[in-house]
């Protein structure tokens, strides 16, 4: 019986992880009727982001292929 505890824990952990990922990436957007990309841009503009870099500033993350 105790040998099955580790298996049950790992299976429930995987199901829980998949559920969280699917909920946050797909289902929550449908329920809240929010597009994360649009909301992120709205908040960015609200906080004063304008896309221009001042002299001496550089991007924190390099531009990656396909982004």
Image (spheres, rainbow, N blue to C red):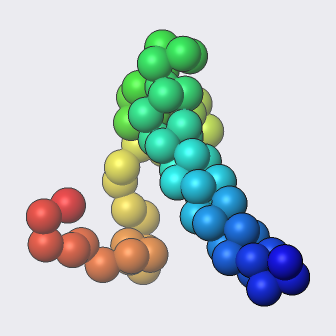
Where is 4 relative to 29, above or below? below
38 vs 55, nearest the viewer: 38
Where is 23 relative to 3, above or below? above
Q: Hey, which residue is sitting farthest bottom in the picture?
A: 3
Residue drawn 61% across and 39% down? 47
Give the left or right position of residue 21, taking residue 55 as reference.
right
- Residue 13 shows in the view: no
Residue 1's x, y, as percent? 84, 78
Residue 18's x, y, as percent? 52, 54
Residue 67's x, y, as percent? 20, 61
Residue drawn 43% across and 34% down? 26
Give the left or right position of residue 64, taking residue 55 as reference.
left
Q: Hey, which residue is sitting farthest left in the picture?
A: 66
Q: Hey, which residue is sitting farthest front in the picture?
A: 1
Q: How many marks?
A: 0
41 vs 3, nearest the viewer: 3
Where is 49 relative to 17, above or below? above
């Amino acid at each position: 019986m105790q040998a099955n505890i580790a298996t049950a824990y790992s299976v429930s952990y995987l199901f829980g992880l998949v559920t969280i990922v699917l909920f946050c990436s797909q289902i929550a957007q449908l329920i809240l009727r929010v597009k994360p990309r649009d909301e992120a841009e709205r908040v960015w503009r609200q906080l004063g982001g304008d896309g221009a870099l001042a002299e001496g500033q550089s991007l924190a993350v390099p531009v990656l292929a396909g982004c």
